[in-house]
Amino acid sequence: MNARVENVSERTDAGVRVWLQTTGGVVGVLLLVQFLTGVLLAFYYVPSVDHAHTTVSYIEKVVSSGSWLRSLHHYGSQWLALFVFLHVVRLFLSKAYVDRTIAWVAAVAMLGLVMAAAGTGYSLPWDARAFFSTRVAEGLMSGLPLVGRNARFWVLGGNEISTLTLSRFFAVHVLLVPFAILGAIVWQFGRRSCWSNLTRNAIAGGAVFVALAIWCAKFPAPLGPRVDEMTADYLPRPGAQFLWLYQFLKYMPGGLGSIVGVVLPGIGLAILLLLPRLKAQRLLGSTILGVLTAMVLTMTIAAYVSDRHDPHAREQLARQATDEGKWRSEPFNPQSLQSSQREPQSTGSTSAAPVMYMKFCVNCHGPHGEGAQQGTLRFPPLLDVSAKPRRTVEDIVNLLKDPAAYGLQPPMRSFHDKLTDQQMREIAAWVVQLKR
Amino acid sequence: MKQMHTDEPKLNRSRRSFLGLLPLGVLAGVVASIGGAAFRFLRPRLSAPSEQWLDVASLSELKGPQPVAKKIVAEQISGWAVTTEEHSVFVLPEKNNQVLSTICPHAGCEVSWEQTTNRFACPCHESYFAADGSRISGPARRGLDELPTRVQDGKLQVQYRAPDGETHA
């Protein structure tokens, strides 16, 4: 009798183990969903800061099934990141880095590529969340040791976030990364083992797809306000797969965030990729995967908990959700393309710059706020600055007092000991009305 | 009992072939669900003909025996964008200011007025139309389309109709 019970229990264990080996099938189905929905979204999406939000709104509000398909793409990317990670862990536990090195390297590379696709994809709708995620990417790049300045320029496609940045992210998101992922998939096709256990893989993949499809029918993908309509109190929150990084950056002062957010994960992925050729594979792999799992889990939970326990954040996030719901129920307004064809106006304001601006700011930002070049240093223009988030008169006064609090770096300095509140307010009021 | 033994391999075979088809079934299921949505997603959105009356010219400008070429500016909603587009029309002052579309009903090219031969000519496939827009010769099967007009405050107005693809007529 005991022998029979043991036998049944062993068989159940074996059954569970076989089903745990279906992460590849789930990843395959989720990748298929990402490719199909991505191609469909590209039929309407326009990668320009002027049109991106409008075209995504059009997909959400007007196009039949648009909200569901975008939701599949949005949440599918989060589920994909989770299942690719589980797939890597599963391959590690079965020592794939020893006897199935191609599968191992392809899976680790896929993890990096899926995160790169998600990172670039978050910027594409060009809503408030997208703007902040691009800002964070900019900050992470500029904080990199030695290459920071150039990395930032290369990511942004210039010295500030612009429509060129969005074009770059779009090209990486829809061309480079998908081609690399396809390459990784094709590379694996030659292996016989990738066809084994196909039925269970298909069942698991199908079940996850049904769950995702139901989830997406219930929860539309979020879309924040347009960047130029965002209020100063807007609280940006990244997607689930980046919550750990968001929370971690709260604890990391200055450039340390780039080390923890980019350099260390990069080194970790590189070691995992090279694992088949390294010694102490078990120790290295389990340390990296263990630390990564612990960090991602802890920080993600901390992010949820801290929002839940902070009454201000809780209220603001609830308000944002209500605003988004209200926006969804409003009819879609087509965007006039006339504005892009209007005659260029002369730069600068017709009103004269305040005396204190001419004394302290003119050397760097120009007499009309047009910016300036001094040697290799390029100072940004102030024209249309009020269209950017956190650049109201009040913001600019506070920025003049404490530029670092607004993410500005030297040579921008604090003027709290040089200008009175009234003088700062005069400068701010003049700056916000500067138009191109 | 013996019968059961001989049936077992058969059952296993059919079970195996069913399970073998399952991955294809899942693939078909995923593609079909997204494909069904894709059909609705990509379905062209046809807009109703514009009811907007557009100024062509003051009645005082429209004189003479020849067709008068005029430009009208129409606002068009194309999905998420509102664009303004300039279109050419011909006004026939001698035919009670009738307005003709310049789009050739054969393949959609834009016809021009040939003063020397007193006819409209299509530059693409050599269809020719008389001064009143009726067909003379060429591959077009009918004359130039007439657009709805009205007179408001001394101005001739027209409702512009974009060609709906029903050329080759």
Image (tube, coloured by chain):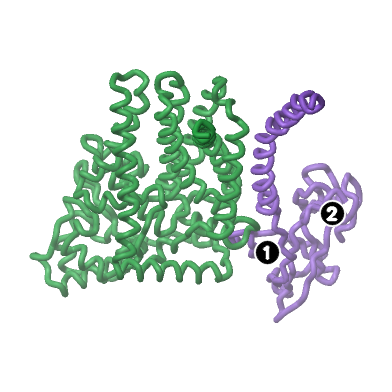
Q: Colour of chain B?
A: purple
**Amino acid beneath label 1:** Ile
What's the residue at 43%, 47% (across, down)? A166
Q: Residue at x 71, y 62 (%)?
A: B47
Residue A392 in percent (x, y) is at 30, 68
Residue A103: x and y, percent?
A: 47, 25
**What is the x, y in percent for residue A149?**
25, 40
- Residue at 41% across, 24% down: A95
Q: Looking at this view, name the residue that lies furthest to the front.
A: A1
Position of A208 with respect to A349 (left or right) is: right
**Residue bearing mark 2:** B118
Q: What chain letter is assigned to the residue under label 1?
A: B
Is the residue marked by circle 1 packed among few (<14), some (14-19), or many (20+) residues within 10 Å? some
Which label's residue is closer to the chain start, 2 or 1? 1
Front residue of A253/A424: it is: A253
Check residue A121 in the rendering and tell me which mark sits there, or answer none.
none
Nearer-the-camera pick, A42 or A114 = A114
Specify whether residue A365 is in view.
yes
In the image, which is nearer the foreground, mark 2 or mark 1?
Answer: 1
Q: Amino acid at mark 2?
A: Asn
Q: Are marks 2 and 1 on the same chain?
A: yes
Which lettered chain is shown in green?
A
Quadrant containing the C terminus of chain A is bottom left
Disc 1 target residue: B72
